[in-house]
Image (cartoon, rainbow, N blue to C red):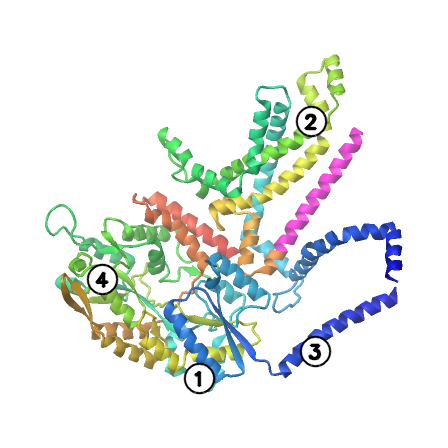
């Protein structure tokens, strides 16, 4: 019996030994090192740029094979993607580097899944940090660690018709203004100009629940992740919901146009304000175009508390898997995304790719878009020109200088809030205080459960 | 040589038993036994990546989690409401359809039919019933009442209770019918002669001889009460109203959040509670069965 046990043990040991030997032999045979970049639902521009990144990286590191895995190619929905990437990460097969979009980022940070990129940036002598917007990089830190690096970024802003604001002598102090101030402005903008009993001038285009959650709820840090708390009390939350409902109500919004719709030149003066997402200078120009070609003044988004927070968002914010064996190489890949070549691609992209994180590339993007002369069709001929102007540049550069906050998104929190907001936004009935209180209390209790888990 | 070994194995009864059992034993080990021990190991380490042994810290952290405690409390409330109700109602229905009554077969099929309805259809039906703008609220409005957001208020547990009973009463009823049909008729006949009323017959004969069946139904009801998570999840998502947030929600959500340490610790705590409960039940059942015999 004892002999049998010994022989089986030796056989098993030999088996494992042979596996180990295979591993060593393979490496000695000069097999390529492989690093994996995975993503879920990137836009076409980012996918196109990814191909250039792959070429540049493999040219610079010929001994390394870059494998790109697209989870959305396999027909995954968000839920399946989250489950799959969780399982992959836990089984040690997770990607080496990946964008943090769509992930429950804070939970991942707390689980130490993301490597601290500031260590790589500080230890890498070749990496010139001052080429980039360091205040944005600092804003991306969580507990003094940098879990993800923004390659590009976008700005959510409030846009008002320049013509209307000048005519009505409206003064907006966007450093201190609140959602209630924005609501008062909106109410003042509604006007029946021809006296037929129906308004001819509206405050906003209609807003969908996704936009409302994004623009208003996530423009601030309502959630204190560190202490598993919601910063707003039920009363403040109720007020916020009432204001949110007012922003989506028929009383203030144009009956025909929804945010993101193209508003024709002829109807441009029917809507005076809008919430916009500025995805680069081209995105800024695109917003002017879709809003009927009118010149716009841009402002920081109103907050519920008036807090002086300048936030940003990013569709391409890359994190490195802390448990990857190829962290150094993944950092090298991240540097390719930040290289002059790739940042210039973002600057000269013909779609709304976001603002590049590199200072020189941002200037280049402005110069590229400044040359554009888009024209709106006016009847049979070409009418109004839509151009970028110096005021637009001033808004963007001033705003970027002031960026001091980044709200790490959490898809689960977004899901909870959206599912609760959806009925009140889509219903045409008015939201009374009692219902808003109940809703606020439901949202708070669900968020509390999530954070207490 | 091979023939000899085969012959030797086939001559031994134990070896043949083992050979027949081997496929299921291997399957059981791969899919249950090994994962069980691996999960047990995970519940004592800091993370899957670091593998640092931290003793009972994960268990302490789970027992301090407000969400876990809330989920445990809700599960306990739901189980202690649903199981007795299921047993009482199914026993009543089983006794009813065991009599010679009009449409007995049709009634029996009607009560068992929820078992074969796919979950998606079940959920769809109950959502229409209990949606804020659903059928139930429509009737409330026609009677000038105030509509209730059933799944987003304290009423949610009642909705889930109704769904659970609707789905599971038929199965328990079938088990009770089988048990009732095994009671010898002679006992009832002699009780008639002795002049016993229906209550005495029910408590002294029916209930006593149904004890083993009742224990089986009791255990099945507990198991099925845990399965109600599927319906809650499909109706109210992974973060439902706090009154119907169950232990399975906690485990499902901790899995989604990569918190496998909390997940495995919670699973083992739950496993221990169920083991203790079933152990006590079997002890009681054996004692009662002994008394009967």
Q: What stretch is highlighted in magenta?
A: B265-293
Label 1 belongs to which residue? A127
Measured in 3D between alpha carbons, the distance from the residue under mark 3 to the one under mark 4, in whole angstroms, is 65 Å
Is B290 left, or right, of B213 in this rendering? right
In this rendering, do the residues under marks 3 and 1 share a single chain? yes
Measured in 3D between alpha carbons, the distance from the residue under mark 4 to the one under mark 1, in whole angstroms, is 41 Å
Q: Does the magenta stretch include residue A172?
A: no
Task: Out of A48 and A305, give the one closest to the viewer.
Answer: A48
**SS class, disc 2:** helix
Q: How crowded is mark 1: few (under 14 residues within 10 Å), some or many (20 or more)?
A: some
Looking at the image, do the residues carrying marks 4 and 2 touch, with CB atoms under 8 Å apart? no
Looking at the image, do the residues carrying marks 4 and 1 touch, with CB atoms under 8 Å apart? no
Q: Which mark lies nearer to you, 2 or 1?
A: 2
Measured in 3D between alpha carbons, the distance from the residue under mark 2 to the one under mark 1, in whole angstroms, is 81 Å
Is A62 left, or right, of A376 in this rendering? right
In this rendering, do the residues under marks 2 and 1 share a single chain? no
Is B145 left, or right, of B194 in this rendering? left
In this rendering, do the residues under marks 4 and 1 share a single chain? yes
Label 2 belongs to which residue? B180
Protein chain holding label 3: A
Residue A291, disc: 4
Q: Which residue is drawn at 76% across and 73% down?
A: A14
Q: Residues within 10 Å of mark 2 (few under 14, many from 20)?
A: many
Label 3 belongs to which residue? A21
Placement of the N terminus of chain A among the 4 image quadrants: bottom right
Looking at the image, do the residues carrying marks 3 and 1 touch, with CB atoms under 8 Å apart? no
Protein chain holding label 4: A
Q: Does the magenta stretch include residue B292?
A: yes
**SS class, disc 4:** loop
Measured in 3D between alpha carbons, the distance from the residue under mark 4 to the one under mark 2, in whole angstroms, is 76 Å
């Amino acid at each position: 019996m004892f002999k049998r046990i010994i022989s089986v043990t030796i056989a098993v040991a030999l088996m494992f030994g042979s596996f180990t030997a295979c591993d060593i032999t393979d490496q000695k045979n000069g097999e390529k090192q492989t690093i994996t970049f995975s993503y879920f639902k990137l836009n076409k521009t980012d996918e196109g740029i990814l191909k250039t990144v792959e070429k540049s990286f493999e040219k610079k590191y010929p001994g390394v094979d870059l494998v790109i895995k697209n989870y959305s190619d396999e027909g995954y929905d968000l839920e399946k993607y989250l489950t799959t990437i969780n399982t992959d990460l836990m089984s040690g097969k997770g990607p080496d580097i990946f964008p943090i979009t769509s992930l429950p980022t804070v939970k991942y940070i707390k689980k130490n899944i993301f490597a601290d990129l500031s260590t790589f940036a500080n230890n890498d002598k070749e990496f010139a940090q001052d080429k980039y917007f360091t205040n944005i990089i600092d804003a991306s830190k969580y507990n003094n660690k940098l879990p993800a690096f923004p390659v590009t970024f976008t700005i959510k802003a409030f846009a008002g018709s320049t013509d209307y604001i000048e005519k009505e002598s409206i003064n907006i102090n966007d450093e201190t203004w609140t959602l209630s101030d924005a609501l008062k402005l909106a109410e003042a903008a509604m006007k029946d100009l021809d006296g037929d009993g129906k308004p001819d001038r509206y405050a906003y285009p209609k807003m969908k629940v996704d936009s409302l959650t994004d623009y208003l709820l996530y423009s601030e840090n309502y959630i204190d992740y560190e202490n598993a708390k919601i910063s707003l009390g039920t009363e403040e939350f109720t007020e916020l919901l009432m204001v949110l409902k007012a922003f989506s109500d028929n009383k203030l919004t144009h009956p025909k146009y929804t945010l993101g719709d193209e508003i024709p030149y002829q109807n441009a003066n029917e809507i005076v304000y809008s919430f916009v997402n500025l995805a680069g200078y081209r995105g800024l120009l695109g917003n002017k175009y879709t809003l009927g070609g009118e010149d716009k003044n841009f402002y920081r988004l109103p907050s519920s508390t008036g807090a002086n927070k300048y936030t940003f968002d990013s569709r391409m914010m890359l994190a490195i898997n802390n448990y990857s064996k190829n962290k150094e190489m993944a950092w090298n890949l991240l540097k390719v995304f930040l290289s002059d070549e790739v940042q210039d691609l973002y600057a000269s992209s013909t779609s709304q790719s976001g603002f590049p994180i590199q200072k020189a590339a941002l200037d280049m993007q402005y110069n590229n878009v400044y040359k554009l002369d888009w024209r709106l069709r006016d009847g049979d001929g070409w009418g109004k020109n839509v151009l970028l102007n110096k005021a637009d540049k001033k808004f963007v550069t001033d705003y970027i200088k002031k960026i001091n906050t980044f709200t790490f998104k959490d898809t689960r929190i977004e899901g909870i809030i959206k599912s609760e907001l959806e009925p009140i936004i889509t219903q045409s009935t008015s939201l009374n205080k009692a219902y808003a209180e109940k809703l606020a209390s439901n949202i708070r209790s669900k968020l509390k459960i999530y954070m207490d888990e | 040589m091979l023939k000899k070994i085969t012959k030797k194995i086939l001559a031994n009864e134990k070896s043949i038993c083992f050979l027949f059992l081997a496929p299921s034993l291997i399957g059981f080990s791969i899919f249950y036994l090994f994962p069980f021990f691996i999960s047990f190991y995970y519940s004592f380490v800091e993370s899957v990546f670091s593998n640092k042994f931290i003793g009972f810290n994960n268990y302490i952290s789970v027992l301090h989690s407000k969400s876990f405690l809330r989920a445990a409390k809700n599960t306990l409330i739901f189980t202690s409401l649903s199981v007795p109700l299921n047993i009482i109602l199914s026993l009543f229905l089983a006794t009813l359809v065991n009599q010679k009554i009009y449409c007995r077969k049709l009634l029996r099929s009607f009560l068992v039919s929820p078992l074969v309805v796919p979950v998606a259809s079940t959920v769809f039906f109950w959502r229409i019933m209990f949606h804020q703008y659903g059928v139930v609220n429509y009737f409330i409005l026609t009677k000038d009442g105030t509509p209730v957001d059933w799944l987003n208020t304290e009423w949610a547990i009642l909705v889930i209770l109704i769904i659970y009973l609707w789905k599971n009463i038929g199965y328990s009823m079938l088990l009770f019918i089988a048990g009732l049909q095994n009671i010898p008729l002679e006992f009832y006949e002699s009780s008639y002669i002795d002049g016993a009323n229906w209550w005495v017959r029910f408590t002294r004969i029916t209930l006593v001889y149904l004890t083993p069946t009742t224990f089986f139904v009791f255990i099945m009801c507990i198991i099925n009460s845990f399965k109600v998570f599927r319906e809650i999840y499909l109706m109210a998502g992974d973060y439902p109203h706090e009154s119907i947030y169950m232990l399975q929600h906690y485990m499902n959500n901790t899995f989604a959040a990569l918190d496998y340490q909390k997940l495995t610790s919670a699973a083992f705590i739950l496993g221990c509670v169920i083991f203790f409960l079933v152990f006590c039940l079997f002890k009681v059942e054996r004692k009662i069965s002994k008394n009967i015999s």
